[in-house]
Amino acid sequence: MLGAVGGLTLLLLPLLLPRAARGLPVCGLCPGLPRNGSLVSRFCESRRDAESDGRCCRERGSTPGRLLGLDLSNCSLHNVPPGLAEATTAIVVDLTENPLTTLPSGSFLGFVQLQRLAVPLALECPGGNDSWQDVTVDRSSRLCQGQRNPCNSSVELAWPCPENSVCAPDGPGLTQCLCDDPFHGYRCLREGTFPMLLFGGILGTATVSLSLLLWGTQRRKAKTS
């Protein structure tokens, strides 16, 4: 009987928990839903395929739905939270009304879909103004809109991609180099498919050899003690 009750409790637990507790931790960094009238709130209300989940706006109809927006405005943030990396699929992010003094380089690494970012007035748009199609300023915030593809920029890249690879965006003002098929490895110098069987065989042999060595060492120690 107790086992049945325990099983029923486990099944009902997700329904009893707050919505933010069931989603990504970043959605529960601040209490409540996206603030009324905020950038994320307006964006979420404009889409029929979206719904609020904690401070996040998610795509409706899938579990868990893809994160589309993140409202961290007025959250007393002094630093960019580590959990921000969970929101790389976000199209809209609001960081206004926080005592943030800097946005470390790489804070928005992987945010290739980000199109609207609101930050406190004291901060610049990540990647600089040239990384955005439009930057507007009001009395307390800065709105960065329309992320540009740095690979299409006329400005020469600081780290040009090596031969057999192509440049790809990796966030505001950030790029990555992806190997052309069928090249792979360091600087895309290896050609052909990755030798998984050979790699697995070498790794397995090394693991077994090391295990036998440790076993033999321990056995000798046990005999001499």
Image (cartoon, rainbow, N blue to C red):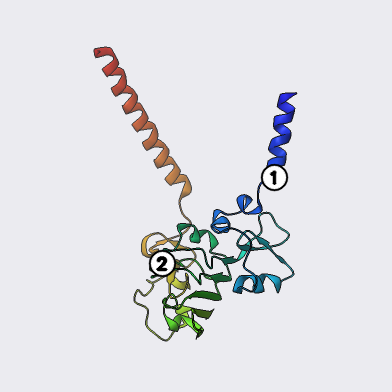
Q: Secondary structure at mark 1?
A: helix
The x, y position of residue 68, in whole percent, is: 62, 66
Instruction: Report the side of 52 relative to 224 (left or right).
Output: right
Callout 1: 10 Å neighbours few (<14), some, many (20+)?
A: few
Q: Is residue 113 visible?
A: no
Q: Amino acid at mark 1?
A: Leu
The x, y position of residue 218, in whole percent, is: 31, 21
Which numbered disc covers residue 56?
none
The x, y position of residue 215, in whole percent, is: 34, 24
Q: Name the image quarter holding residue 103.
A: bottom left
In terms of depth relative to the viewer, which is nearer, 37 or 128?
37
Q: Farthest residue toward the left?
A: 224
Q: Secondary structure at mark 2?
A: loop
Task: Please tell me whether mark 2 or mark 1 is closer to you in this view.
Answer: 1
User: Circles 2 and 1: CB distance less than 8 Å?
Assistant: no
The residue under label 1 is 16
- Looking at the rendering, in which quadrant would you find the N terminus? top right
**Residue 68 drawn above or below residue 122:** above
In terms of depth relative to the viewer, which is nearer, 29 or 24?
29
- Looking at the rendering, in which quadrant would you find the C terminus? top left
Label 2, label 1: how many angstroms apart (C-alpha)? 37 Å
Q: Is residue 78 visible?
A: yes
Callout 2: 10 Å neighbours few (<14), some, many (20+)?
A: some
The x, y position of residue 114, in whole percent, is: 54, 72
Q: Amino acid at mark 2?
A: Gly
Q: Earlier in the sequence, mark 2 or mark 1?
A: 1
Instruction: Report the side of 89 relative to 172 (left or right).
Output: right
Q: Residue at x 62, y 66 (%)?
A: 34
The residue under label 2 is 106
Instruction: Report the side of 65 relative to 193 (left or right).
Output: right
Q: Residue at x 31, y 18 (%)?
A: 219
